[in-house]
Image: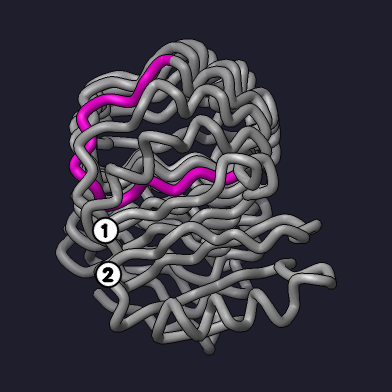
Amino acid sequence: MLSYDTIDELTEYCEKKSNITLVSKLFHEATKMKIIYKINAENINDQIHYRLKLNYWQYMKLDEKYYNRVYYLEFSLSRKVEATLGSIGNCVQLQKLDLRGNQLISIPESIGNCVQLQSFYLNRNKLRSIPESIGNCVQLQALDLSENQFSSIPESIGNYVQLQTLYLSWNLLSSIPESIGNCVQLQTLYLGGNQLSSIPESIGNCVQLQTLYLSRNKLSSIPESIGNCVQLQKLYLGHNELSSIPESIGNCVQLQTLNLSWNLLSSIPESTGNCVQLQTLNLWNNKLSSIPESIGNCVQLQTLDLNWNQLRNIPESIGNCVQLRTLDLKNNQLSSIPKLIKKCRVYW
């Protein structure tokens, strides 16, 4: 990492090293400079990284002949970065762009020229929309749009067939495009803290999905197609308005964490017992009157939270859950509980 407090120091270094491959990584975290000037080293033969973080830089200027050598730009927690973004479309080899934590209200259409972009971080800004041209960035593998003011996401999201990680939490989203189902490589999807009332059936096409976070929305149902996501390991559905869970949940046999707390569930499917890898099941604050006998098949279960329900009994099969360490049965209508393994801590 190269770090200099003045332009003169940086320029002097560049002049001394101009006959070798100078910049494989040019990271400059300034605390005194307000402007970074043009870099004119003639013999830069490698790719350039700029990291402008936690500083007061107002804009960056780079000789045009070097634009196609820039592949990593970080302007996180910077100020007045808009002036730089005007020329972002010239960085056609850009692979990673980090703009998190700014006051951005828009992204230029020219972002669509960055067709090599693989990682794009825009979280913690003030964005309400994103240009359709971003659909040209078909190499994207990671996209973070969380903590903005988006009310919709363009259909072009479906162009990202290589996308593996997508963060859309804490926006104002009321729906997700059906085209999300085209993102067949998606492994992690965060949609918590929005206003979603439904999830498209096409989510079932995302068969590589491992983590799905949907807590704190207004969901009244989950599509049957969720059962196609057989690689799913973590599913968070807490703080919604769900009155039922599809039987197909039993197809998610790799599921380890299932959070259904703060919903309106009166029962859970018998097929839940097929989730034999389940370790944590949170059903706190629902309207459950019973638990299926098949819960005894979840022999890896370690934590079961049934607090604040309407349970009158617990199936004897719970005794098969030999890994169970915490069972919370408080605030129910139970008169007795089955015999459990000695190491299990029971609250009732």
For the residue pair 136 and 212, the one nearer the viewer reads as 136
Q: Secondary structure at mark 2?
A: loop
Q: Name the residue tied to disc 1.
A: 58
Residue 7 on the magenta span: no
Q: Neighbour class for label 2 at 10 Å: few (<14), some, many (≥20)? A: few
Q: How far across and down, in percent of the image, does residue 62 sit?
A: 51, 51
Residue 48's quadrant in the figure?
A: bottom right
Q: Are marks 1 and 2 in contact (CB under 8 Å)?
A: yes
Asked if residue 44 lies left or right of residue 66, the reply is right
**Chain-order first, disc 1 or disc 2:** 2
Q: Secondary structure at mark 1?
A: loop
Q: How far across and down, in percent of the image, does residue 7 sit?
A: 43, 77
Compared with 249, 104 (above or below) is below
Q: CA distance from mark 1 to mark 2?
A: 6 Å
Asked if residue 260 lies left or right of residue 106, the reply is right
**Magenta segment:** 118-132
